[in-house]
Amino acid sequence: MSTMRAVQVTGYHDNLRAAEVPIPVPEGPLDVVVRIGGAGVCRTDLHILEGQWAEKTGVPLPYTIGHENAGWVHAVGSAVTNVAEGDKVIVHPLITCGLCRACRAGDDMHCENGRFPGIDTDGGYADYLRTSARSLVRIDDSLEPADVAALADAGLTAYHVAAKAARRLTPRDRCVVIGAGGLGHIGIQVLKAISPAELIVVDRNPDALKLAVSIGADHGVLADGTQVEQVLDRTGGHGAEVVVDFVGEGGATADGVRMLRRAGDYHVVGYGENIDVPTIDIISTEISFVGNLVGSYSDLSDLMALAARGAVTLHTAKYALDDFQTALDDLDAGRVRGRAVLVP
């Protein structure tokens, strides 16, 4: 079989299309082809179809979408020594050069020569994916690719922001998490595992809040229009030292800023709207806005260690690769608890 199934963007503001394309082969000495065991479905995939990334990436259409991938090594380039055919792996979202200043610092997300499968080159909504040896993390035998695939981006992003937030959080502090969905439910588990702070989770869905409390949140706050007042009550009127916003649209940022304590950090993860804050309010309270973009290879390795010991569990809804449209529709309509995963 020299062709494979691939799910492609053929036009913006248009549905994805299934196609038959050639199976990729290693072209460079450090290339690796992975047989996909699971490909996560991400809200960013919806944003791509809306055209939000079109100007940023300039990717020629059609191309294969999907940036949360795990599976088994299928073929390796001549210089690959860190993985072998048959190895079970999760794929760091970026293909990085290893040579630029950012890579040398371990800051893979800002590689000067990086490519991002699923965003600006062919991704993993397919039977096979080409990536590089540098991008692969071998996973514990106890983990299955379809169960951890979404940790490659959703989990990695949640780990990255949680690790940054945890560096400043003490046992006296409060951390508000806005959104307990695909990313949020992972962020809650990571914060519980690595931070001593009190965790307050805000979501408009009662089931999402139940899940949040069951996996480690100290308090669940229903976003029913009184969420800001509820958080202020719970923090003695001061607000939280850290707000981690996994929503970033639909008015979440205006609420989130009001929940923040003086000198607090506002971590932006979910996106879609502008943050509108008078500059005088930023300087008079000395608050910080921190962007978070996926995470480093080391972050992914750390997350896999937490997953292997059972400290982080991904709640997934699995769909056949051919049912990609149902998965996207369910995600768009808010019907997915946790994370949707396509399984070839």
Image (cartoon, rainbow, N blue to C red):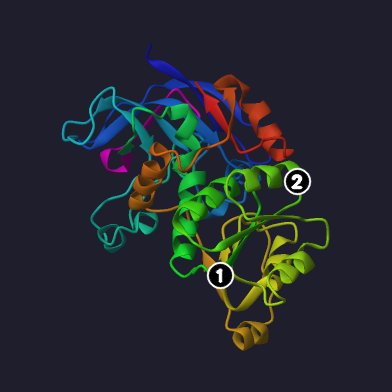
Q: Point out residue 259 in the picture as x, y percentages from the top left corner.
A: 69, 70
Q: Residue at x 49, y 45 (%)?
A: 155
Using a 10 Å C-alpha cutoff, classify the residue at mark 1 as few (fewer than 14 neighbours), some (14 to 19) or many (20 or more). some
Residue 279 placement: quadrant: bottom right
Q: Is 21 above or below relative to 299?
A: above
Of 108 and 118, the residue lying toward us: 108
The residue wearing badge 2 is 205
Q: Is 280 above or below relative to 11?
A: below
Using the numbered discs, state the Cα–Cα distance from disc 2 to disc 1 in whole angstroms. Answer: 25 Å
Earlier residue among tags 2 and 1: 1
Q: Residue at x 59, y 49 (%)?
A: 184
Using a 10 Å C-alpha cutoff, classify the residue at mark 2 as few (fewer than 14 neighbours), some (14 to 19) or many (20 or more). some
In the rendered structure, which segment of residues is drawn in magenta? Answer: 124-136
Q: Magenta stretch containing residue 135, yes or no?
A: yes
Q: Amino acid at mark 1?
A: Asp
User: Circle 2 — which element?
Assistant: loop
- Evaluate whether residue 14 shows in this view: no
The residue wearing badge 1 is 173
Q: Residue at x 41, y 44 (%)?
A: 306
Q: Magenta stretch containing residue 209, yes or no?
A: no
Of 149 and 204, the residue lying toward us: 204
User: Circle 1 — which element?
Assistant: loop
5 displayed left or right of 46: left
Residue 141 tag number: none
Residue 86 placement: quadrant: top left
108 displayed left or right of 258: left
150 displayed left or right of 260: left
Q: Point out residue 255 in the picture as x, y percentages from the top left corner.
A: 73, 66
Residue occupying the far right of the picture: 225
Q: Is 266 above or below relative to 279?
A: above
- The reply to whether dot 2 and dot 1 touch (C-beta < 8 Å) is no
